[in-house]
Amino acid sequence: MKKVINPAICQIAGSTRTARAYACIKYENGKLSISGVIGPLSNGNCRGSCGQCSEEIAAGTPAEGWTAEMLEKFIAIWDRWHLNDMRATCEHQRDLGWENEASQEITVYRYQLTSEASDQKKQAENAALKALRKGETFTPSKEQVMFATLPYTVESYGEELDSPYYEPKKQLYAGDRGATEIKTRGFVNYDDTPLGILCKPCPVCGYKYGTSWHREEVPQEVIDWLFSLPVPTTDPAWV
């Protein structure tokens, strides 16, 4: 099934002019997809945004045959059910609220060894190599073992690292992530930190979050409502 609608009239960014916003609703084999365009032109361009532009369309004025309540409901359905066959969660994880948790932000702090600690690490490693080359037995001190096993870089999730051997990572080139980065929990691996949700196993079925796509069935009343929406009074150049 496919339907084109004209839910709103939107102001064009950076202009006082307005343009009609259209949306194309597709529902095939249990998969719902919605895409929009503001002010489509015959040359394939558009006056405003296109694609997943629900936020821009939500800010518009309801078109003919629409009310503010209808527009709000349509946007809510769009944001909730678009690409319902590409859910990173299983049904149990959804019931547990993992989708909301996955969008929560945490700060990733990145550190590198201080120059002093790095020197100590190299000295410990060189002492072992020196003994090996001479065919001698090398028995490292506890301090040498400690420095030799320190990684050159570490990451701390959600809180800063308190260690005399590390300092905030320096940005070495344009595009280097540097000392901090904001990530959502859904993109942080559970094996790296309990704050992460990526690959975290479901307590019910064992499925690891984000390792495959799952389909969430769209309620029939949602589909019925979408395909009962008003037909546009004008035809778009494309949508």
Image (cartoon, rainbow, N blue to C red):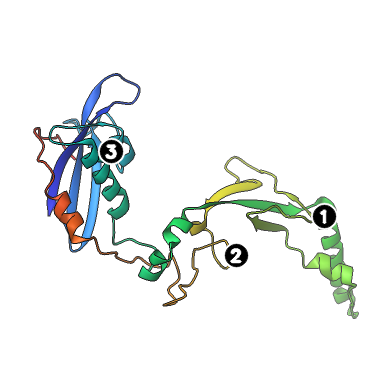
Residue 47 lies, with reference to residue 111, above or below; the image says above
Q: Secondary structure at mark 1?
A: loop
Check the picture and name the quadrant holding the N terminus: bottom left
Q: Earlier in the sequence, mark 2 or mark 3?
A: 3
Q: CA distance from mark 2 to mark 1?
A: 22 Å
Tell me the kind of residue under disc 3.
Cys
Three-letter code, disc 2: Asp
Task: Work out whether residue 189 can be spotted.
Answer: yes
Residue at 49%, 68% in the rendered image: 199
State the residue position of label 1: 164
Q: Is residue 54 above or below residue 190?
A: above
Return the residue at label 2. Answer: 192
Contact between labelled residues 3 and 1, with CB atoms less than 8 Å apart: no
Q: Secondary structure at mark 2?
A: loop
User: Quick one: SS at disc 3?
Assistant: strand
Q: CA distance from mark 2 to mark 3?
A: 37 Å
Within 10 Å of disc 2 (Cα), the crowding (few <14, some 14-19, many 20+) is few
Residue 11 at what x, y percent from top left? 28, 26
